[in-house]
Amino acid sequence: MSRYTATTEHDLEQMLATIGVGSVQELFDRQIPAGVRLGRALALPDGMPEQDVYAHLRELAARNVSAEDEVSFLGAGMYDHYVPALIDMLMERSEFLTPYTPYQPEISQGGLQVMFEYQTAICELTGLPVSNASVYEGPSAVAAAGYLAKLHNGRGRLVVSAGMHPHSIETLCTLVHGYGMSVIEVPLVDGVTDVDAWTEAIDADTSAAMFAQPNFYGAVEDAARLSAAAREAVSSGAAANGAGGDSVAAPVIVAQVDPIALGILKPPGECGVDVAVGEGQPLGNRLDFGGPSFGLFAAREEYLRRMPGRIAGETVDVDGRRGFVLTLQTREQHIRRERATSNICTSQALNALAGVVYLAWLGRRGIVELGELLLARTHYARETLTALDGVQAMHSQPVIREFAVRLDADATAVKARCARAGVNPGVDIHALTGRESDRGGLLVAITERRTRADIDRLADVLGAAVAAEQQAVMA
Amino acid sequence: MADASYPDELLYHPEHDWARIDPEGPDPAHPEATLGITWYAQDALGEVVFFEAPAVGTLLVQGAPYAEVESVKAVSDVVAPLSGEVVAVNDALADSPQLINEDSYGEGWLVRIALSDPAERDGLLDAEAYSATLGG
């Protein structure tokens, strides 16, 4: 019997004879209780010839409009950055594309070294000493950070800024529902987290305090101030309650960060942040209709044993040569079972490979230059758009690669008009957040692929669309 | 520790934990006891790499797990052989967890507690009875 070809009739007869069963059907009849059997054929349509299938799928695919088909200013967590051919070339190497988790280090040194280098790059970007080999994506990384805080201090409340991505907050709420924590949202004021409300919300039962940098509305938060305020909220609270000699430990401070923005922002590790998580897609991964991508997860050393995800470690073999292994596996499910640091035990190795190759391709200077380019172009875009009639900035905070405007017309209708002109002006904010205060909101993202000419065209198309929509409504 | 050993002066819990009750203590009503894991436990675990002690003041309940010992390949609950309040923890284990393997009954002690119900000692096994549970 060959391991590489399908089972033949002869193979089947031999196997059935070995186990003493007359037929495959008899195997099912003897093992599967009658009460759970479907009892009829599956309701599938007839098969189609391959040529017809191809034509059918082409027709379905043609209904999609990608960032290659229109000038797109969509963002809100995933961005249309340029992905160099170098990345595809490396990702498609079978040594990277095909292997499973590197439990056997002796045959996985290449993959493990890539993980280690990826982790190193994330530590340098975030200014935090430890990183895992990646998790699935940004929102579940936020939820995992919440679980880390729960394991660390056992408290009941998670205080989150309303500036966090709505998908992150939603994922966090879904996860904590299972273990009974509550999520308290702190509102924004003029586009950034309301520091007074933030301080007020944080108490001795707060497990973690979380914010996004930049936030969902594109604004740069004062990360150092939020971290300091979270620590003071607890220590001054303890003093006020006459806790005497007892000091209440600060909540775990979590920041969801945009890795591209870290090229020009002060790293979270230097802003008092304990755990930095984020969506890794902007690093070397295409939009791909939303995934797969990877999540980054970095933290201070004291949280190492509570971290989820795979971790690659550097060590020496029996001959004293440097090598890499998966380490601290006792955190994970296959050893710790229900007391593991996560219900997920995997990494997005291939997407993280794209991420670290992208960072190496950009280099230390390149990521700074990219950040400066985005900063300049985004401010130009905001100035140009807010000069239009019926378009106002939602806030005046510094922005890096994305900003929010409010349209004096229905955002959905305006977007439809822009689409007909081959432009996607951005994300309909209210459709994503459901917040009343976001009605008419449009989130506009700028990447290095959007030229000044593209931005000028956006201004023309958007201005015309808003004017036309206002006219249509009045008529 | 190379060879199996189960000191006679200790009391044992079937979940492979030992207790050394201190006859001289600050409070005669609540004698203190030092707790740890047996030679059998450290041998089964392999090289211990991590032990996180509970905080001083934690209340232990006889038979309930109060901490975890981690080796390279496994994580194991440490069960309290007696009930009481933690009065001291072995800080040396943070940097030298291998003491649990090397000197399970001495330098590898885990916590010290003030017993809440000293009569519980009657439910524990002596060295001979505990060895018998380990089989041949």
Image (spheres, rainbow, N blue to C red):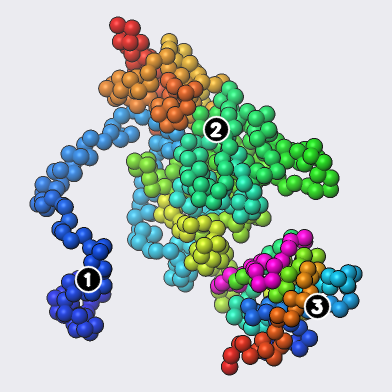
> Which residue is painted at 77% across and 61% down in the image?
B56
User: Quick one: label 1 or label 2, which is nearer the N terminus?
Assistant: 1
Residue A28 marker: 1
Farthest residue to the bottom: give it: B136
- Can you give x and y, in whole percent of width and height, for residue A184 in the image? 58, 37
Residues indicated by labels 1 and 2 sit on the same polypeptide chain: yes
> Which residue is painted at 34% across and 41% down in the image?
A289
Amino acid identity at mark 3:
Ile
- Can you give x and y, in whole percent of width and height, for residue B15 in the image? 63, 78
Quadrant including the N terminus of chain A = bottom left
> Which residue is painted at 26% across and 62% down in the image?
A36
Please give left or right for residue A305 compared with residue A57 in the image. Answer: right
Amino acid identity at mark 1:
Phe
Farthest residue to the top: give it: A475
Residue behind mark 2: A162
Q: Quote the CA–CA distance across marks 1 and 2.
A: 53 Å
Please give left or right for residue B14 compared with residue A335 in the image. Answer: right
Residue behind mark 3: B21
> Which residue is painted at 76% across and 67% down in the image?
B84
Chain for numbered disc 2: A
Q: Quote the CA–CA distance across marks 1 and 3.
A: 61 Å
Q: Which residues are magenta?
A: B56-75
Location of residue A306 (image quadrant): bottom right
Q: Dot 3: what SS?
A: strand
Q: Is residue A460 visible?
A: no
Answer above or below: position of B12 versus A112: below
Residues indicated by labels 3 and 2 sit on the same polypeptide chain: no
